[in-house]
Amino acid sequence: MKKVTFFYLEACPYCKNARRAMDELKAGDARYRAIEMDWVEESERPEVAEKYDYYSVPTMFIGSEKLYEAHKGEEYEECKTNVKRVFEAALA
């Protein structure tokens, strides 16, 4: 199992959607609860954030590979689909 690094901002509505998606996915599949997460609030840990190549949040990496980066106007279901894809990659 691989660790997921999750970049977010506390006040970001897209990040809130990603957290909601993670909670729902974990509630529905116990395997997802076992995934190790590194939560990086980018304004609190800029020294970590600057080492990664991304533009917007939420963004999820496994190692140095960016697997998900939200975009303006993204709907919840698209977010949830992407979070699930990242979780599946972490389990592979």
Image (spheres, helix red, strand yellow):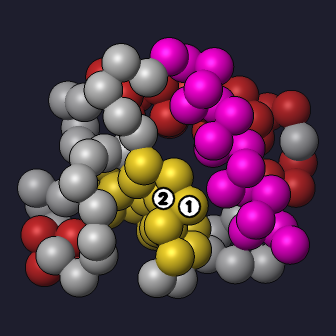
Would you place residue 54 above or below residue 82 in this image? below
Magenta stretch in the rendered image: 75-92
Q: Nearer the viewer, residue 68 or 3?
A: 68
Q: Nearer the viewer, residue 47 or 72?
A: 72
Is residue 42 visible in this depiction of the protein?
yes
* Residue occupying the point 23% across, 38% down: 10
Please state the horizontal and vertical placement of residue 32, each as a whole percent of the image: 79, 53
Amino acid type indicated by mark 2 = Met
- Marks 2/1 in contact by CB < 8 Å: the verdict is yes
Decide if residue 68 is on the left or right side of residue 2.
left
Q: Which residue is mark 2?
A: 60
> What's the magenta bit mostly, secondary-structure-wise?
helix
* Residue occupying the point 25% across, 30% down: 12
Q: Which residue is mark 1?
A: 67
Decide if residue 17 is on the left or right side of residue 91.
left
Would you place residue 54 above or below residue 84 in this image? below
Which picture quadrant has residue 36? Answer: bottom right
Q: Quadrant of the C terminus?
A: bottom right
Is residue 33 visible in this depiction of the protein?
no
